[in-house]
Structures are given as C-alpha cells and as structure tokens.
Image (tube, helix red, strand yellow):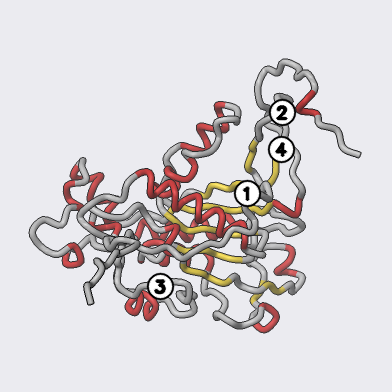
Amino acid sequence: MSTNFFALKRANSSGALNAMVDDGFQYSLGPPESGFSLFLAERTKKVHFIRHAEGFHNVATKETGSNDCLLRGDAPASAHELYDARLTAKGIAQADMLRGYLAQRPSGSRSFTAFDLVVVSPLTRTCETALHVFGAPREPGKPAFLTKKSAPEGTPEHAAGVTIAPPRFLVREECRERWGHYVCDGRRPIREIAEEFPNFDFSEIVHDDDVFFSDARETDEHCCERAVKFLEWLNKRPEKCIAVVTHSSFLRHLFGQFGENLHSDDMDDLQRLAGNCELRSIVLCSHGNKDGKKIDPLMPPSSAPSTVRMHSVAM
C-alpha cells in the first residue's frame, strides 16, 4: 500500500535545510517543502567534479586582462602557442596538493578517498591534471585484482598493508570545455595525446582530429544540452564513486541548470565559477525515467540535410 503525500496539505516551511552532511559536502534537495528528498540508494552515485589546474592560458588572460590573447589571428588555431594549453608549474603543484588532500579525506569506511573510475576531458590540461591527482591509471582491459598498489602513505590502511586497485581513466569528449573561438579550447589529435598519456582509455573517442573546434563559439544551449547528456551517460555507468576532470565553463553550463530548489547558500556553492583544481562533490540521483535511454556518441553538427528528395525522371 502506498500513500500519495503530495495530495496532502503541505505545511509552511522556512526553506530548505542542510539536510545531509557526508564527505565534507552539504546539500539539500527540494520538494516537498520539508527541505528533504528521499531516493533509493541504488539510484545514487557520488560524482566528484574537478576543474583542471592552472594552465598557461589562465596566466595569459590574467596578465593581459582579456581573452584577446586566445584568439588565433591570421594563423591556424593549432599554430598558436596556447592551443590546447598545458599546465604551468603552479598548476602541477595544485594537482599534487589535491592528491595529498584526497589521501587524507575520509570516504566510506576508509581514511582516504578512492575512486572506481576517473572520467577525463581529452584536452591536454585535463589529462595532465588527472595524472598528477590520481597517479598512473589502471591499464585498459586489466581487471582490478591484477593491478594493486599500496594505500596512501600515512594512512592506517597503508600501515596495515592494505592494497587498492588504481582507477581506470576513461576519456570522453562530452565533458570537454565549451569549444570554439579561443585557441586554448581546441585539442591536439588523439594519436598525439594518447602517446603522451599511456593507459588512458581513448576507445570511446570517435574522431582523431578535433572536428568540433571552429572560429565560432559553441552556443550556450548546445553546451547545456551535452552537459545533461553527459549526466545521463554517467548515470548508466556501473561505478558508484566517480571523478570527472573537466573545465570551468562546462561546469558552469552544467550546474547552472540545477539547484533552484536548494537553499540559496547551497545554490551559490553549486553554481559559482570553479577555481583551478577545485573539487566539487555532488550526489547524482536518477529518477528512473531515463535509465533506458540510448546515449549516442557526441558528434559535430551536420551541415548536410537529413533527407534528399530526387526529382522524378521521365522514362
């Protein structure tokens, strides 16, 4: 027997509450007006979004005071020194600091945070960030029980000789930065990136060359749409604790679509611009109504018509 509580008269509420506290991230979810929401645990997973560490393009825009230094000018975008920009020495240090933080951040029954999967944007700066934060990935296709390493040094688990499997690094085009116009947001061919980052799994990337980058900036609407599609893809993954190494504008377009039913402080924390190498953790819950939806790979907009009508030929 079930009861439809939404049909009952709702009591007035002073607003959403900081209803749950876990892993250092406070969140509250909307209706009913009690400030709580209940979800089946099997439909939830933790996703830890990480913006890439400081890149040379970040330094250039800060020093010049504008984004004009990121325009290609008369030369091809790929010839620009900031095309697919890399991390600075400060950025590498930021990633190393985050690695140290995660080694001391309790999660579940462990004294440190371990991940089942790391999803990475294919741009060089996100691949570099992932490598410095999480260390070498598990070889694609190799089972976890054949790839073990010691727990982080200084933890009780390390002292006890506990071993863990490093996560897989799966590269997905959907979580790349909003593309176009600025040279830093183009990427090198996958054949070059894959050679530099062995054991990153590029098997789900469709195109070697960057078919998405152009002089035109990706529209806000399209970036928002692919951000939600990326969540749908994450929801279909079997892993329960996932890290995503991505970009600030992508995160702004993703988080800006959520949080209207949160407490104002929580909404501000969710939607504000992410800093370099910032970790932002959320709990992703599926309502179940899109679980069977097919997720097609990201493709560039087609300039060809979907149908072509041939005129009749007299015989």
Please give the label number shown on residue 20: 4
Please give the label number shown on residue 32: 2
Q: Which comes before the other along the chain, label 1 or label 2?
A: 2
Depth check: give the residue in front, 211 or 303: 303
> Horizontal and vertical percent for residue 132?
47, 66
> Could you tell me which secondary element the residue under label 1 belongs to?
strand
Q: Is residue 232 left or right of residue 69?
A: right
Category of crowding for the residue at label 1, using alpha-carbon neighbours closer than 10 angstroms: few (below 14), some (14–19), many (at least 20) = some
> Could you tell me which secondary element the residue under label 4 belongs to?
strand
Category of crowding for the residue at label 3, using alpha-carbon neighbours closer than 10 angstroms: few (below 14), some (14–19), many (at least 20) = some
Contact, mark 3 vs mark 1 (Cβ under 8 Å) = no
* Residue type at numbered disc 3: Val
The residues tagged by marks 1 and 2 sit, at their Cα atoms, a distance apart of: 19 Å
Depth check: give the residue in front, 170 or 20: 170
Question: Residue under circle 3?
Answer: 206
* Residue type at numbered disc 1: Leu
What residue is drawn where x is 53% and y is 60%? 99
What residue is drawn where x is 45% and y is 80%? 198
